[in-house]
Image: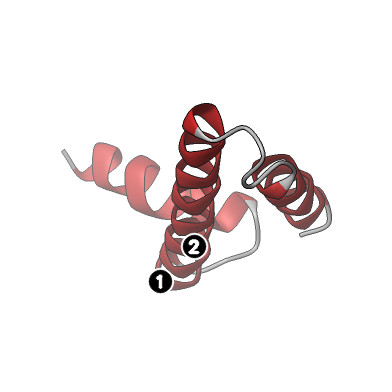
């Protein structure tokens, strides 16, 4: 159990030079941005002239943020 806790909550955040809470914050912000991009894509599906580039721009931004961290 102790090894699971260490692997699940300590190893991965450390592998990206973050504490658990720093990693939590980054991942939550990332998830919210993906959610917004998904909503924009959903709107675009029903109304093609709306949010034409919103989702793709957000995904490019997130890729850059993830790649440069």
Q: How many marks?
A: 2
Which residue is located at x 71 percent, y 41 percent? 52
| Residue at the top extreme, as displayed | 45
Q: Is residue 62 above or below residue 19?
A: above
Please provide percent x and percent y for residue 7.
38, 41
Please say if the residues under marks 1 and 2 sit with CB atoms less than 8 Å apart: yes
Query: Along the line of sight, which residue is nearer the eye, 12 or 56?
Result: 56
Which residue is located at x 16 percent, y 38 percent? 1
Can you identify the residue that label 2 sits on? 23
Please provide percent x and percent y for residue 60.
79, 45
| Helix, strand or loop under label 2 | helix
| Helix, strand or loop under label 1 | helix
Q: Quadrant of the C terminus?
A: bottom right
Q: Is residue 30 above or below residue 19?
A: above
Please provide percent x and percent y for residue 57.
76, 48
How busy is the neighbourhood of tag 2: few (under 14 within 10 Å), some, or many (20 plus)?
some
Query: Along the line of sight, which residue is nearer the eye, 6 or 63?
Result: 63
Instruction: Give me the disc on residue 21.
Output: 1
Query: Along the line of sight, which residue is nearer the eye, 41 or 34?
Result: 41
Which residue is located at x 75 percent, y 57 percent? 65
Q: Is residue 36 above or below residue 49?
A: below
Which residue is located at x 75 percent, y 44 percent? 53
How busy is the neighbourhood of tag 1: few (under 14 within 10 Å), some, or many (20 plus)?
few
Distance (Cα) linking label 1 and label 2: 5 Å
């Amino acid at each position: 159990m102790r090894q699971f806790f260490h692997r699940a909550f300590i190893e991965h955040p450390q592998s990206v030079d973050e504490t658990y809470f720093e990693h939590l914050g980054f991942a939550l912000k990332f998830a919210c941005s993906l959610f917004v991009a998904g909503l924009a894509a959903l709107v675009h599906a029903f109304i093609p002239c709306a949010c034409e580039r919103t989702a793709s721009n957000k995904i490019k931004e997130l890729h850059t943020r993830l790649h440069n961290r």
